[in-house]
Amino acid sequence: MIIITCNKDMRTVPNMYILNLSISDIILLKSVIIDFILSLLVPFGTIFETFCTFSRYWGQFACGLSSYAVAVLSIQRYNMIVNPFYDRVSSQPGWRDAMATICGVWIVAALFSIPSALANLY
């Protein structure tokens, strides 16, 4: 992650998606570790219910983030294979376009994770 963010030559479209996947994996790992530790330390009660709501949201968010990013990357690679000359004639997408797409994926993953967090409240 440090190499991709610090080195401008490494800021290619596939590397940006790999960076996004590594960030989503860290979010998922952090959520699993915190779930385990807090389930051992915190007894049942209001704090535990609030924690379960946020824990379910972050787990769903990280899973959605990974799967949506892989889906977007697969669609882009499919378009490159099906229409190879069309993509070569048009402007090549830069890392800023990839970042805009990744931000869109984060927004979609955040919005689609809200129902799983709200399901715990009822």
Image (cartoon, rainbow, N blue to C red):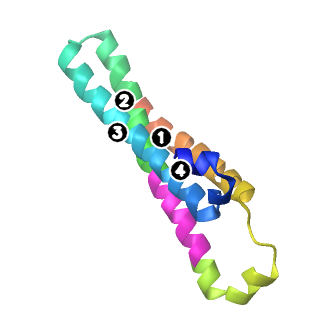
**Helix, strand or loop under label 2:** helix
- Please provide the residue range marked out in magenta: 66-77
- Quote the CA–CA distance across marks 2 and 3: 12 Å
Q: Which residue is labeled 1 in the image?
A: 113
> Which label's residue is closer to the chain start, 2 or 3?
3
Q: Is residue 122 visible?
A: no
Amino acid residing under circle 4? Asn
- Quote the CA–CA distance across marks 1 and 3: 17 Å
Q: Nearer the viewer, mark 2 or mark 3?
A: 3
Amino acid residing under circle 1? Ser
Disc 3 crowd, CA 10 A, few/some/many (<14, 14-19, 20+): some
- How many numbered dots are placed on residues in this image? 4
Amino acid residing under circle 2? Ser
Above/below status of 14 relative to 111: below
**Helix, strand or loop under label 1:** helix
**Helix, strand or loop under label 3:** helix
Amino acid residing under circle 3? Leu
The residue sitting at 64% across, 51% down in the picture is 7
> Which label's residue is closer to the chain start, 4 or 1?
4
* Residue 72 belongs to magenta span: yes
Check contact, mark 2 vs mark 4: CB within 8 A.
no
Check contact, mark 1 vs mark 3: CB within 8 A.
no
Observer-nearest of 43 and 2: 2
**Helix, strand or loop under label 4:** helix
Q: Which residue is labeled 3 in the image?
A: 29
- Quote the CA–CA distance across marks 2 and 4: 20 Å
Quadrant hosting residue 9 = bottom right
